[in-house]
Image: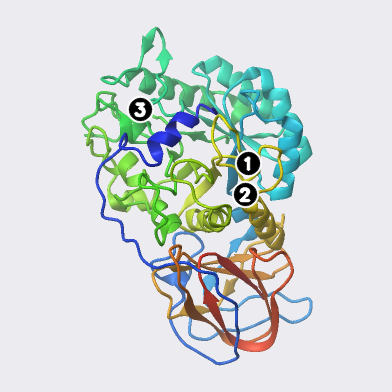
Amino acid sequence: MLVLAAPLWAACGSSGAKSGKGVDAIGNAADGGIGADGSAAGGLADGATSDSAVGGGDAGSSGNDDAGEGGLVGDSTGTLAVRNNDFLDSMGVCVHVAQGVDSPSQSATALSYAGIRNIRDDGNPAVVTDWIAMHQSAGVHVDVLSNQNVSSTIGMATQLNDAGALLAVEGPNEPNNFPVTYEGQTSSSTSFVPVADFQRDLYAAVKADSSLMGIPVFHSSEAGGSEPNNVGLQFLTIPDDAGTLMPAGTQYADYGNIHNYVCGHSNDLVDNAAWNASDPTLNGDWDGLYVEYGHTWNGGFAGYSDADLTTLPRVTTETGWLTMGTGAITEEQQARVFLDLYLSAFKRGFAYTFIYMLRDDPVQGYWGLFDTSYNAKTSGTYVHNLTTILADTGARAPDKLNYSVVGEPATVHDLLLQKSDGTFDLIVWDERLTGGTDSVTVDLVTSRATVTIYDPTTGTSPTQTLTDVSSVTLTLSDHPVVLTL
């Protein structure tokens, strides 16, 4: 597997990781229709309350809709939008080109269809040209895993970067499952010193190479949580007085890196699964940020405070749920969870989210967005629909929209995006994954000339178009809808 298969079994349904529950699992899931009315309503904007990690703003009580022909769409007060392009840039998937399992050309075609912009693969110098070809064909960028050789990893990174295809350099994958050998020493169940030495030297080498200026380094995945001795891998840079074996000031990475599989250890399709898996301070059923960088699950070593965790730069380079085998869910369930997952992770502050994996494989499991023949599974189709509805490549400064979601229960979340032409895409999603629906009203404060509603589980065409409305009532269940205005 992508050096990624064994960790799956450690992450989903096994007792090999951490202990500790306490998940706030709320809500349910059945598909409901979308309705709308023109009645006014009031409330607090989600972007200004506990749901805000990305794109929050000040909720105002009055708006100024400047959606005139040729004018900007924006209000003087409200929630500041995030660029559509920024959300789309956060979407990634794990591939197995480096292992010879995935075809570069067929994978590129699948990635183009899905609209996914980033891939993660094992470090293998022999396939750098394949990754570059995939970049040229599908526009994807590569998070390249180290191959436990600093100079070789830098060589791969510089080749990719020269071709405009590099996203990031990543440290060793799950050293608790795959020991790291460096400078004649191999990590073990009692010492991660070789992991720490390698990650430190890899970081220094990337930062010392002028051709890699601005390229981020992702931390070694699972390393902080699983370290048997306190070498400080629960930090990006070891702070003073941390009491670690490595000295204060040791620099490891620019981003924390976790494998918070949405299936959790229990494989239970609970409500708010994607939202809770992305919670930076929750010690729950998932290998989240807290047990990797706050209080490590193996050694119980102290890391960042809860306050620091909420702002820690972070990525998830593996997450997902399989559709065949132990703990499997249906293709339809997987598809809806994956939509929620990309949105929840971004809203809760993850810069990049890589779902494991692009394509089903009989050896590595049926985790894919595509089947073994590169045909889109339901998840591949729904992701395609979402990225098509949101498609944009511009970089204009976003505006504010004055809105609120009234009567928003704990399983309902929202994210305000804006396209480069000024159009807002307000995404509202529910995570009642065990059944049921919620009725919520989106208060748009002032009358909006046109509101178009999309449901990525039905296609890329609008399900409803409303005119001159100041509020929209939605019946939600287990997936997002998009309001474009």
Look at mark 1 in the image and give the residue it sits on. 118
- Quarter where residue 332 is shown: bottom right
Residue sitting at x 76%, y 31%? 133
- Quarter where residue 154 is shown: top right
> Residue 19's x, y, as percent?
25, 42
Which image quarter is the N terminus in?
Answer: top right
Q: Secondary structure at mark 3?
A: loop
What's under tag 1, amino acid-wise?
A: Asn
Q: Mark 3 or mark 2, which has the lower sequence index? A: 2
| Distance between the alpha carbons at the discs numbered 2 and 1 | 7 Å
Q: Secondary structure at mark 2?
A: helix
Q: Mark 2 or mark 1, which has the lower sequence index? A: 2
Tell me if label 2 and label 1 are in contact, CB under 8 Å.
yes
**Residue 419 in the figure: left or right of residue 301:** right
Q: Secondary structure at mark 1?
A: strand
Look at mark 2 in the image and give the residue it sits on. 89
